[in-house]
Amino acid sequence: MITVDEALSLIAAKVGPLGSETIALADAAGRTLAEPLIARCDAPRQPLSAMDGYAVLERTTAAGKRLELIGESRAGRGFAGTVQPGQAVRIFTGARLPDGADYVVMQEYASRDGDHVTFTEGYGPAPHVRAVASDFAKGAELVPAGTRLGARAMVAAAAADVSEVCVARRPRVATFATGDELAPPGFAHLRPDAIPESVSFGVAAMVAQEGGTVVSRRTGADELDALIAAADAALDEADLVIVTGGASVGDRDFAKPMFAPHGLDLWFDKVAMKPGKPVWLGQARGTVVLGLPGNPTSAMVTGALFLRPILARLLGEAKAHPWRCLPLAAGLKATGTRETFTRARWDEDGLIPLDNQDSGAQAALLQADWLIRCPPDQAALAPGAMVTALRF
Ligand SMILES: Nc1nc2c(c(=O)[nH]1)N[C@H]1C(S)=C(S)[C@@H](COP(=O)(O)OP(=O)(O)OC[C@H]3O[C@@H](n4cnc5c(N)ncnc54)[C@H](O)[C@@H]3O)O[C@H]1N2
Ligand code: MOO
């Protein structure tokens, strides 16, 4: 059995980017850049005023001195002339600084009298001028490849003055829940022994959150022939198939056997962790196949630890898990022989392990905002101890 870190290294070694497509910038929010975004012009392209006020030549201007107003410069419509000593141009935020001017006096320090303006004491010393290329220069790499275009990155991307961007193709994901007992939510109560199929709903949400597209969702009873046929269809339509349940050692655990006739090449099978030990990963016909344990909490923990990096790799994102070092606000039990991921919630004083650590739990997932990572055979920890944790 391999360790969690070994499994993550295997994912990094085996899973790579899918390819790219060019799309309109307006459609690019949430997508991942496949190529760096290069600025097509300086920002600003011209010296601009950062305030509403008056553009002047600093060394010839002083409080109490009456200046002649010779025009107006507005954002998008600059003043065409040149400011001489003894003159001023009315200017607005974002407007081009007129030739000859090097300074803007805020209007709060000005009193206007027809075509003249006089400044009061106290303006400056800031010139309130944004110099050419003071934000970024033409040719600069504004947004690196591999960046997910969130709200802030979208501003930078648009500021590069491009209308289209080259982004990573969205991974097409097929989910496949196995188990005789599973019924679609809303129908489980109609059949004795049935339970609502809940895991694929969490998996699909995680896929969407991480930039993938769920192209199909299947639920299959534990009948191997039918599962083999359905696996064939899932492999055809997806870059990644996520099969849940049937991963363990039961007589009807068919998650791996259903892919075997399709040439399943297992990259790892079982990870020394709790919960989630039966998690496995491989490839069949060029499609990545991830097997998550059926227990809902185990599926979400292994999804957070392995599905997220798999999707990031398919998208060409170079990100590692953002482990944090945080204090415990309550005691933590000793761990067993496997690396352990304890579900916890955040309190203002630190992390509080949840009482319900059953890997089949579903309600407790709601409170489990953090995973505490502990090595095997770790003694119990007291409140105040620092632990490694990951946002869940
Ligand atoms: N003798 C052993 N038994 C088990 C072992 C073991 O090592 N030896 N491992 C245990 C561990 S750890 C886990 S985790 C589970 C996972 O097993 P499977 O992946 O084969 O999952 P299933 O048996 O199919 O289901 C487990 C549990 O989860 C429920 N389930 C399954 N799929 C869903 C779904 N889509 N939505 C909601 N709930 C689901 C299922 O009804 C079971 O209750 O095996 C242990 N056993
Ligand atoms: O690892 Mo299983 O996920 O402990 O229940």
Image (tube, helix red, strand yellow):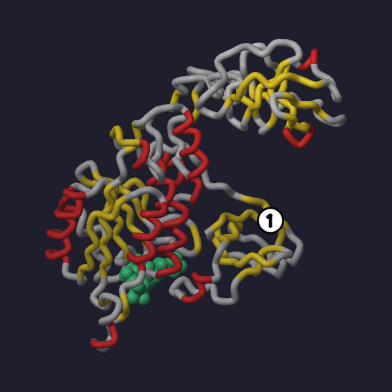
Q: Is residue 17 visible?
A: no
Residue 241 in the figure: left or right of residue 80: left
Q: Is residue 12 above or below residue 125?
A: below
At 19% across and 44% down in the image, what residue appears? 285
Q: Position of residue 101 (x, y in %)?
A: 68, 16
Q: Is residue 6 visible?
A: yes
Splitting the image into 4 quarters, where does residue 360 fall?
bottom left
Instruction: Say which residue appears at 71% left-offset and 65% top-offset.
Output: 348
Judge whether 282 appears above or below 221 on screen.
Answer: above
Secondary structure under the numbered disc 1 in the rendered image: strand
Q: Which residue is mark 1?
A: 326
Is residue 157 or residue 178 the one in the foreground? Answer: 157
Residue found at x 33% / y 65%: 200
Query: Mark 1 belongs to which amino acid?
Result: Leu
Asked whether mark 1 and ligand 2 are closer than 8 Å, the reply comes as no
- x and y percent of residue 387 in the render? 67, 56
Q: Quadrant location of ligand 1?
A: bottom left
- Residue at left offset 45%, top offset 23%: 38
Q: Tell me the quarter of the picture where residue 207 sits.
A: bottom left
Which quadrant of the view contains residue 28?
A: top left
Tell me where residue 244 appears, x and y as whole percent: 32, 63
Within 10 Å of disc 1 (Cα), the crowding (few <14, some 14-19, many 20+) is some
Q: Is residue 258 left or right of residue 81?
A: left
Residues 23 and 355: in front is 23
